[in-house]
Image: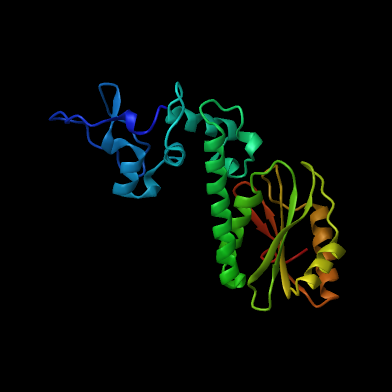
């Protein structure tokens, strides 16, 4: 196996070396006898300077740890980013999305998926512990991670208790690239079942453009009116793009 340690040169360093890369810049590995110097490897850079200095490729290298024979871990990490286009899109990948990438087998795919799920669960746990009225950025970060990079529209409902803490986060509808059927009465029925006092709903725009459509505005009005009949407040409807979020509440509602 072409593991992480085999790429490190432990021999004494020559007297003169070029200076280490500046903090925050993409590293330029220094080679001796065809191997990277130990202090230039991602793990050592993270320990010395923190995770913020690492590139997306280096972060993936640390997660994978090693490649397979004929496929070093750095090549595999670059192949993953090329396949998905971004780290965020990779976080939404399924098992089948990772299949066929040379140098990564079932064990590594499972490892990546487990780490991604841990990140999602951590964000959900944080939302259960605090009032989401005071943590809008936590909600937006979670939703960007959950649905921001998807290639089909997904409608999410976050059911909250009387103290605006998360009771349940559920996928209420799934559509295509441009169309999705959402049923406000079903969402209201679910709110009653969960004894929710309020909701935050969200859906993604696969195009990345977060400007709401006319149908988005109609749905928001209908959903807000339907929930009001059962004394449940619609706190916000968020439209999630790749890098942006549109808030109906902040915009003054439709």
> Which residue is painted at 67% across and 56% down in the image?
246
Furthest residue toward left:
15
Q: Nearer the viewer, residue 34 or 71?
A: 71
> Which residue is painted at 58% across and 40% down in the image?
90
The quarter of the picture where residue 238 lies is bottom right
The quarter of the picture where residue 183 lies is bottom right
Q: Is residue 244 visible?
A: no
In the displayed structure, does residue 189 sit left or right of residue 99?
right
Total residue callouts? 0
Q: Is residue 98 visible?
A: yes
> Which residue is painted at 30% across and 41% down in the image?
22
Q: Position of residue 191 (x, y in %)?
A: 78, 69
In the displayed structure, does residue 90 sit left or right of residue 172?
left
| Quarter placement of the N terminus | top left
In the displayed structure, does residue 24 sit left or right of residue 154?
left
In the displayed structure, does residue 252 sit left or right of residue 115?
right
Q: Position of residue 142 (x, y in %)?
A: 60, 56
Q: Position of residue 31 (x, y in %)?
A: 28, 26
């Amino acid at each position: 196996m072409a593991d992480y340690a085999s790429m490190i040169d432990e021999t004494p360093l020559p007297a003169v070396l070029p200076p280490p890369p500046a903090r925050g810049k993409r590293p330029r590995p220094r080679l001796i006898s065809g191997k990277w110097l130990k202090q230039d490897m991602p793990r050592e850079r993270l320990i010395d300077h923190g995770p913020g200095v690492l590139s997306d490729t280096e972060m993936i290298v640390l997660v994978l740890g090693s490649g397979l024979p004929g496929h070093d871990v750095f090549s595999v990490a670059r192949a993953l980013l090329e396949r998905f286009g971004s780290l965020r899109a990779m976080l939404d990948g399924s098992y089948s999305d990772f299949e066929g990438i040379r140098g990564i087998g079932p064990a590594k795919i499972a490892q990546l998926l487990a780490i991604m799920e841990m990140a999602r669960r951590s964000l959900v746990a944080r939302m259960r512990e605090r009032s989401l009225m005071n943590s809008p950025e936590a909600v937006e970060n979670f939703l960007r991670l959950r649905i921001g990079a998807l290639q089909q529209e997904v409608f999410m409902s976050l059911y909250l208790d009387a103290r605006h803490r998360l009771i349940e986060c559920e996928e209420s509808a799934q559509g295509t690239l441009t169309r999705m059927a959402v049923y406000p009465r079903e969402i209201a029925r679910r709110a009653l079942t969960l004894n929710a006092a309020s909701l935050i709903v969200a859906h993604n725009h696969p195009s990345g453009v977060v400007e709401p459509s006319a149908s988005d505005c109609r749905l928001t009005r209908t959903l807000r009116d339907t929930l009001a009949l059962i004394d449940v407040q619609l706190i916000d409807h968020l439209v999630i793009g790749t890098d942006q979020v549109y808030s109906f509440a902040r915009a003054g509602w439709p």
